[in-house]
Amino acid sequence: MSSHSLPFCPPFPNPVCKIACDFDIQCQQGLTCYKRSRGQRNVPGCIGNADEIGNGDFNFCVTPPSNQLVLLGISRTPSSAYPLRRCAGDCDTDADCASGLFCLERNGSEGVPGCIGSGQPQFDYCYSPGSGFKRLAFFGDQDYDYYELGQCEGDCDFDSDCEIGLICYERERDSGNVPRCVGNANLIGFGNDDFCIPRPSSNFLISVFENEVGGDVAGGGQYPIPRCAGDCDTGKYFIHRNSSCLNLAQRLNIHSNLFQF
């Protein structure tokens, strides 16, 4: 969350079913501001005719469903609210979220995957992109030892720059989305770097070792060589008899379609 100057009440003053609010931050911890118009008499979880209170068009603080964006704390206060659950805010880093969740940084009221509502504008919320995701990390545009970079780490140039079982996802400046990774790749490093990602299928061509001049195998490699794996220097792949592997053209086509997992 970036710094805010909010021209309204201090955080969390209003209890459930009490008026009046315009923003979630005006409600007590764990509540959201239920916005309504005149004629909408019923307020979820509250008793009474809202049209008969005040001038009839007040909003009320209510208890939201579990998948609605909700503020539980700000700047790690209260400490009892952290780590934050899914769809809860405000977070500043992934460390503010429960295990397996990520902090989605927002510039306005952008939607949060898996959550409903718009939340407090410019505040950030924890979410789950799914299992097996990691955040993008850039370690520099340089030569690496073999099998050094982990999932969502870059910059890579060959599969052999990545841990065994990962491939180098080659990209130009695009949407910034990298399969099985969290973050915008256009905003990391030089903006057009490549990152290691999980092999999308067991028949996807992959390099497991790389030859130096003279044919000596560097880095140890993976032996015996698994199906559809081989040497990215020569372009030759080891294919078991009666097995089917994606050829190079198919591999490039998958790259161009951002790997449809």
Image (spheres, grey):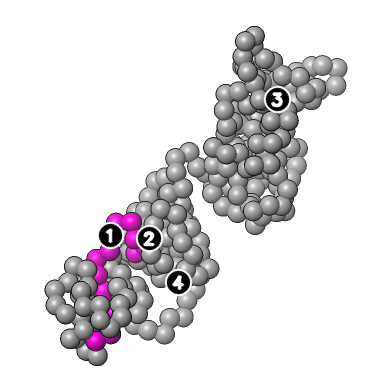
First-in-chain label (4 vs 3): 4
Label 1 to label 4, Cα distance in Å? 19 Å
Q: Which residues are magenta?
A: 56-70
Q: Are marks 2 and 1 in contact (CB under 8 Å)?
A: yes
Question: Is disc 1 placed on a helix, strand or loop?
Answer: loop
Question: Which numbered tag is attached to residue 247?
Answer: 3
Q: Which marked residue is nearer to the observer: mark 2 or mark 4?
A: 2
Q: Is residue 154 above or below residue 43?
A: above
Q: Is residue 3 magenta?
A: no
Q: Which marked residue is nearer to the observer: mark 1 or mark 3?
A: 3
Question: Which numbered tag is attached to residue 116?
Answer: 2
Point 20% across, 80% down: residue: 50
Judge from the rendering whether residue 251 lies leftward or rightward of residue 35; answer left or right: right
Label 3 to label 2, Cα distance in Å? 42 Å
Say if residue 162 shows up in the picture.
Answer: no
Residue type of the residue flagged with mark 2: Ile
First-in-chain label (1 vs 4): 1
